[in-house]
Image: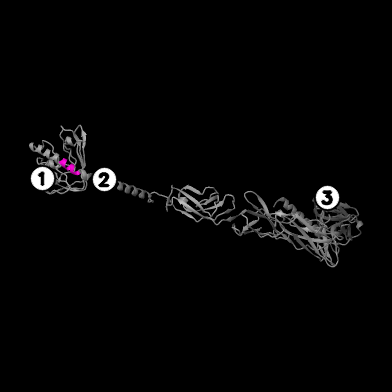
Amino acid sequence: MGPTFLCELGLFFLCTLLCSGHAQDAVLTVEPSSTIFFIGEIVSFKCEVKEGKHTDWEYKVMEDGQEILNSNTNKDLSLKLASTVQSGKYSCSAHRTTSQKTKTSNIVSLTVTAGKPRATLTPGSTIIPVGGSVTLACSVGSSAGWKYEWFRRDQNTDVQIRTDDQQNGVIRVSQGGIYHCRGRRGNPVYYTDKSDDVTIKITFSNKVVVKGRPSWPQIFSGETISLTCEVQEGGETTEWEYRWRGPNQTTQWTHNNYWIFRVSESSSGDYTCKSRRRDDSYSSTEWSEAFNLSASTGKPRATLTPGSTIIPVGGSVTLNCSVGSSAGWKYEWFRRDQNTEVQIRADDQQNRVIRVSQGGIYHCRGRRGNPVYYTDRSDDVTIKITFSNKVVVKGRPSWPQIFSGETISLTCEVQEGGETTEWEYRWRGAKQTTQWTHNNYWIFNVSESSSGDYTCKSRRRDDSYSSTEWSEAFNLSASMPRTGNSSFPALLIVGLVCGLLLILLLLCCCFKQSKDSCFASTNQTINQTINQDEARDSQHASPHQGDACLYESVKDHDDTKNVESGDVTYSLIEFKNITQKDESPLYAEVSHKRAKAKRNKEKSASAAAEEVIYSEVKSQPALDYSLLYAEVSHNRAKVKIHKGKSASAAADEAVYSEVKSKPALSNTEIK
């Protein structure tokens, strides 16, 4: 607890003692009798003492214990409030000079508020039924001591309707008009600001109706609408004024019972109207029931629906035009061909459905209202006349399977009647539809995506809106070779192999005929050569003195004489003698045939078994040698081994041998 608190506590107890001791000595009252005052008001303090005459006393008024007013004989003291700081606790004291007595009064708390107060008018109702009345109440916040003044005005005058000294905070009125009030108090009088106006009207029982023209349930932004306010009168005719209330505004009173405006998105909402007599501006009907306006944004588009887009020769089709679910439209129709566009029908009828027998491009649009409002035009609809000519698609090549990378040519053929017509053609494929062209073919490289149906149609070159029907589909199956997953490489290889085998077979046939004719002469020549070599070798006993021809004879039959066991595989032997300057080897190609070889008696079985197919035999260096090739045919030939040759030498023999050629065999090919 601080020193300040202790001081305040002491003053409180002192004041309590003083007040309790002199509570009945003097009484302080305030006029006006309120605890809330406003800057500019004058407060009257009255300090009354019950003893003696008031002239026997001297009076003082104190604010929070400080003297602010005094008087020798007048008990009524006045103070003009100029600031809110004058809010506080007020008291008075009376001092009697003859007896030296002092009387102290009670304490009165006052609050001083800045600003001038405003009266508030609250009506019980703003509508006075015919023959009835309403109450009006006026007040000034929570302050007291006010008296009120009332005012009413009509279209001509503004009069004060009641002024008295009563606290007439509530009055009852039966006249229509504009009312306001204000408060007053004090002496001299202090006035509040006047209240807001309140209009009190007398309501007629006539019913009012709003009608819209056009009366369509849906209105588009940009259209014009006319609203009419109609009063359902009784027996007498009355001149009325009208007032409108919409979603965004309320109009002034007017003699016109219609409201015309251009619709926008913000126009959507409820519209009402009321009426009043022209000679009584504060008597009117009630507001009408609401007319709801739904404004659609965006301009509507007409929709053209054909019964069919194909007109058979000599026939016709129907076309239907509409604008969504909205009503009240009339329609205009247009047709164009490759040269002109004309309006084909425009009248005041709701020509929603028409029938046409001409090919062309059609569209329509709707119109309604006054001024006329037009919709956007419909999408184009192409109407064509169909010819009965049949169209056929043919493909070249006509293989059932086409591979990717091949080229195909499709032809569109029109089956004409007696007359010849110049046609245009159009194609529809798996992925595209072509434009009209004078060419009746379509050539392209096939890919995997080319698979599908292909059709065509035709039309006369002089009439772009008459055509045949689409042809029956030509189905194209495009095969795409893959990595090891396609049979195409295998088929190609098989084809090549078959072709080569056929060629080899033909060559073999030719070789067979040639062999039969020359093989006999070949055997004779070989035998002569061998016999000569044997005769020469017999004269020279040494087995290694010279080299002998290993082939004794080649025959087409088996010679079993003097043949030991053991087979050698031989086939066709083809000898070629090529002149060589040096020693040349002799080679023999052996096929899968068996020929029996006659072994030399001196050769052992083990040596014979180890014979190899190819053997090299040195030729005589003195002679002109040639390479001799031997191809063994499908016959068995006996080979006579030289008697003077040892078994080990015979075992080393091979089919490839170097043979001493005879001059007579030079440049000779033997089969």
Give the label, 3 or 2, closer to the camera. 2
Q: Amino acid at mark 1?
A: Ser
Cα distance in 3D space between marks 3 and 1: 163 Å
Label 3 element class: loop
The quadrant the C terminus occupies is top left
Q: Residues within 10 Å of mark 1 (few under 14, many from 20)?
A: some
Q: What main secondary structure does the magenta stretch of the protein show?
A: helix
Question: Can you say whether 460 is above or below 667 in the image?
Answer: below
Q: Give the mark nearer the N terminus: 3 vs 2.
A: 3
Marker disc for residue 510: 2
Q: Which residue is mark 1?
A: 604
The location of residue 363, given as percent across then percent down, is 64, 54
Picture quadrant of residue 626: top left
Q: Which residue is mark 3?
A: 82
Q: Give the mark nearer the N terminus: 2 vs 1.
A: 2
Give the label, 2 or 1, closer to the camera. 2
The location of residue 416, given as percent across then percent down, is 53, 54
Cα distance in 3D space between marks 2 and 1: 42 Å
Q: Residues within 10 Å of mark 3 (few under 14, many from 20)?
A: some
Q: Amino acid at mark 3?
A: Ala
Label 2 element class: helix
Label 1 element class: loop
Question: Which portion, as a residue range, is magenta?
Answer: 519-526
Q: Amino acid at mark 2?
A: Cys
